[in-house]
Image (cartoon, rainbow, N blue to C red):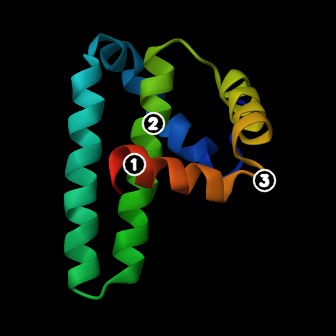
């Protein structure tokens, strides 16, 4: 097994046994799963349970990894996409990205 995903490799590996079934899921499955995790996240925050809230965000990462798995990406490819995306789109542009989301999406 790979270790390309660093601390998230175990999350990736946990889903290997159902990856064929995951590949059959529609994209809406992943979208809804993220919504559910954010609902649970808000509940934990409201209860003051920071650790449980953090676990829900790891679940969101798990869902993102499985969506990438559905698209046929390997851990190595995901690692490269993440590095490239950060370098080309995010580094030094945090404020610009926040401003864009506020201007366009009003968030």
Q: Which residue is mark 1?
A: 60
Residue 84 location, x and y as percent?
77, 31
Q: Residue furthest front?
A: 103
Please give the name of the residue rendered at 44% of the width and 43% of the height, measured from the top-left corner: 62
Q: Nearer the viewer, mark 1 or mark 3?
A: 3
Q: Does residue 89 appear left or right of residue 97 in this picture?
A: right
In the foreground, 43 or 59: 43
Give me the C-alpha separation between circle 1 and circle 3: 25 Å
Query: SS of the residue at dot 2?
Result: helix
Snapshot quadrant of residue 42: bottom left
Give me the C-alpha separation between circle 2 and circle 3: 24 Å
Residue 36 location, x and y as percent?
20, 50
**Nearer the N terminus, badge 2 or badge 3?**
2
Snapshot quadrant of residue 107: bottom left
45 shown above or below 54: below
Please give the name of the residue rendered at 35% of the width and 61% of the height, measured from the top-left corner: 56
Q: Which residue is mark 2?
A: 64
In the foreground, 17 or 86: 86
Q: Which residue is mark 3?
A: 92
Give me the C-alpha separation between circle 1 and circle 2: 6 Å
Q: Does residue 2 appear left or right of residue 52 in this picture?
A: right
Residue 9 location, x and y as percent?
63, 42
Query: SS of the residue at dot 1?
Result: helix
On residue 4, the disc is none
């Amino acid at each position: 097994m790979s270790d390309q995903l660093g601390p998230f490799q175990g999350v990736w590996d946990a889903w290997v046994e159902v990856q064929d079934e995951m590949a059959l899921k529609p994209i809406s499955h992943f979208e809804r799963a993220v919504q559910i995790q954010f609902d649970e996240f808000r509940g934990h925050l409201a209860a003051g349970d920071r650790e449980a809230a953090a676990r829900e965000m790891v679940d969101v990462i798990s869902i993102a990894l499985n969506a990438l798995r559905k698209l046929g990406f390997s851990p190595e490819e995901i690692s490269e996409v993440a590095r490239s995306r950060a370098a080309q789109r995010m580094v030094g542009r945090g404020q610009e990205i926040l401003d864009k989301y506020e201007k366009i999406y009003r968030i």
